[in-house]
Image (cartoon, grey):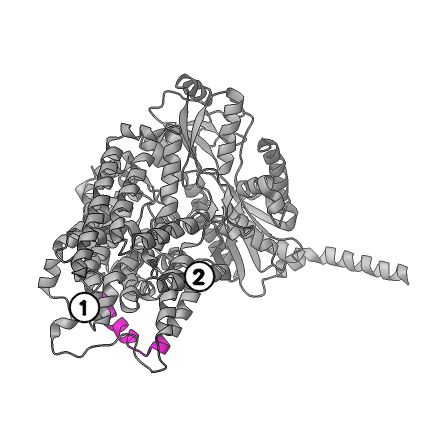
Amino acid sequence: MPIKSKLLALAATAMIAMISPSLAADWKPDGPLKIQIGFGAGGSTDTMGRVLANEMEKQTGWTIVVENKPGAGGVAMFTGISQMPANGKTIGMGVSIPVMVQLVQRGDQLPFDLDSFDYLGTVAKAELALVASKDAPFDDLEGMVAYAKEKSTMPVAIMAPPQILMMKQTMKTTDAKFDLVTADGGAEVMKLILGGQVLAGFGSGEQLPYLESGDMKVIASANQSRLSYAPDAKTFIESGVNAYVEPVFFLAARKGTDPAAVAAIAAAIDAAVQSPAVAKIVKNATNGSPLNMGTDGTRKMMFDGLDNAKILFAQ
Amino acid sequence: MVDLSIILAGFSDAFSLTNLLFVLFGVVLGQFVGAVPGIGPIMAMAIAIPFTFALSPIVAISFLVGVNKGGLVGGAVPAILMNTPGTPDAAATALDGYPLAKQGKPLKATKMALFSSITGDTFSDIVLITVSAPLAVLALKMGPIEIAALMIFTFSVLAGLMGSSLIKGLIAAVLGLLVACIGSDPENFTPRLIFGYWDLFDGLPLPSVAIGVLAISEILHRMSESFGRVRPAIEFVESDDPDQDRVTWAEYWGCRFTMLRGAVIGTILGALPGIGSTAAAFMSYAFAKASSKDPSSFGKGNLHGIAASESANSAVMGANLIPLLTLGIPGSVGAALIVSAFMIHGMQPGPLLFENQGRLVYGLFGAMLMANFLNLWVGQIGLRLWVKVVSAPESIIFSSALLLCFVGVAMATSGLFGVAIMLIFAVLGYLLSSFGYSLVIFIIAFFLGPRFEKSIAQSLALTNGDLTQAYQSPVAVALLILSVVSFFWFLKRNAAVEKEQNS
């Protein structure tokens, strides 16, 4: 008997494994599919999320509802997702770095970890740049460090915790001193640079019109690799500071969601990410191209990213 | 400089029939949702943006402008008719609007709000269209140190609103600041007072606190005062005087300086990203009261009070577009939503916008002017409707208003968590006002506290921890001196007014 039931179970598993791809094509949400965005209305995550949802709705015919759940860079929203039933009715869209930072800094207080989610895909990668006013007397990170040493200190505008850590790492490596002025988003960083209150600051896309107009220049890429639009600017790593952040816009659902649902939603996201409408909004928001790492790729990106964040933010 | 032909082409794009209809639709929608307690124009724009995907850029942006401008007018309606402002800036309108409505002149009060709102709005639109570029350069020069000084000046002017008890005013302000501390600190993002609730990481949701303290607590008060007899929420006083239901030209013209001052304050504060309409509305109100020959009539239904508040808070919205269009810096949530609509339609606000998209920008300007006129016409009709609605029995009005507040806050904060916070603050607001603490001061402190903290933190970082270096900024020094002067001037004046009242 036990053998028979084991065999039955095995057969059943095999059956499920075999039919699940076709199930994926047939699965559709029971009622509206809710996409929760971990940021407030009007930001780049929100804008991209809404365009993506609109494309998915057009392509699949599902009813999709977009909700904003701002708080702690998406952590409030993922906290909510991690407590919901895994029924494939609600998925979340957020940015990788803020989640990792909170997991590293106060993971013990969070009700979730990276294993609490099934990853569905990504939309784009944000290119984070350190930019300066065109009049700044330096052109790269080494020059900026030398200038800060000469002036004994230099103000730099930042907008999120990872940038604080990157600048702290820079100070530790180079012994230069920077005063970190925390701004409310990239637009305010640009205002501080244009107004001459700071010489340099971080931008994740807001700087692009000023690069085009010649009011600003790129000092360094804060990503792992160089920026697509400024291939001559070195990364922090190339400049001798072992730190980088790689913010990725990704989507995830509660762990344990029906594999057919995960496959169907991931397929819908993938198809939508390839649409011209999403390409246009990604171009406008990040100056990059849409990028979907797929379910496994997204999961790997999150786990690898967390390992890197642990090393970077351990200080 | 933009070519005249581009300006004309832009305006002719704007003045098409399709566009007119969409602006009209936007204005009607905005006035309606603005007037419904709990749902503001921001909410309406957030919902409307996905519906503009299919529209052409100029039509889409005109429509959103219509919603935004309609919402400005609509927002004054619940504040005046029911004393239940949905946003902190409308609370200034309620100070004189509601007393006037209670005197049986609801139409007069709402019409004054409509006219002064459109006057302020048109003023700032004209400033935007004509001199936005030089103004934006000036705004850039206002760094964190100057902004901090400006906020200190704002506080010193608002001290004029403290009311009779300085101690109670201070307690209300400190309580507001304490509540504003909840959430991550503006410098290092360390969570404060969140007790494990990650939803609080970015601070208490503003709609929950504002609607709880300002609207729901007022409804609770009014319910506690009813005696089981059916009565209308607003009582009309029958009168043969036709001027009771309208604003005469003499009354409007009499408020011209008040409105002009409000529009100028609103335009200046609106051009500086991040301070917002609440400060402008209350500052304009405080100035109007201080410069009035009869300051004791404020708070009792003075038309100048409505004119001051509405002209200022509406002027902020037009002026918010100055840093937005010229620099790509949104000055408010409403402006941020317009940026996102721009991006969806392929425009990137910034230094090259006028050069690359001049035609679209002037089309937007045309749509703004069109929306102002439509706002006036739609408002004239809409206000009669709202006044009729509010003259229904209290039991119906209050229960529907409560329902709408619940729904609105649940939508604005995406869930019941925000509703729970709203209820907590409704009870707090009820207790505070029952014991004679000013809710207005509480909400101003809550609203401006975080901005002030942020600018102080930025100034500290910029001056390397030594705030005395502020003397290097002439603007900051001038503002700080003005603050000291105005603080004592307002205190003295308040004391004089009180003496007069007592004798």
Disc 2 and disc 1 in contact, CB within 8 angstroms: no
Is A246 above or below relative to B280?
Answer: above
Tell me the chief SS of the magenta region: helix
Q: Mark 2 points at which residue?
A: B422
Query: Residue B12, can we see it?
Result: no
* Mark 2 Cα shell of 10 Å, populated few (<14), some (14-19), many (≥20): many
The chain carrying label 2 is B
User: Is residue B296 rendered to the left or right of residue B158?
Assistant: left
The chain carrying label 1 is B
What is the C-alpha distance between the residues marked 2 and 1? 31 Å
User: Is residue B404 rendered to the left or right of residue A253?
Assistant: left
Residue at image coords 37%, 60% = B44
Outermost left residue: B250
Q: Is B385 one of the magenta-colored residues?
A: yes
Q: What type is the residue that disc 2 sits on?
A: Met
Q: From which residue to which does the magenta span run? A: B378-397
Query: Residue A137, can we see it?
Result: yes
* Mark 1 Cα shell of 10 Å, populated few (<14), some (14-19), many (≥20): many
Q: Mark 1 points at which residue?
A: B108
Q: Toward the viewer: B482 or B431?
A: B431
Q: Based on the displayed image, in which of its 4 quarters is residue B486 positioned?
A: top left
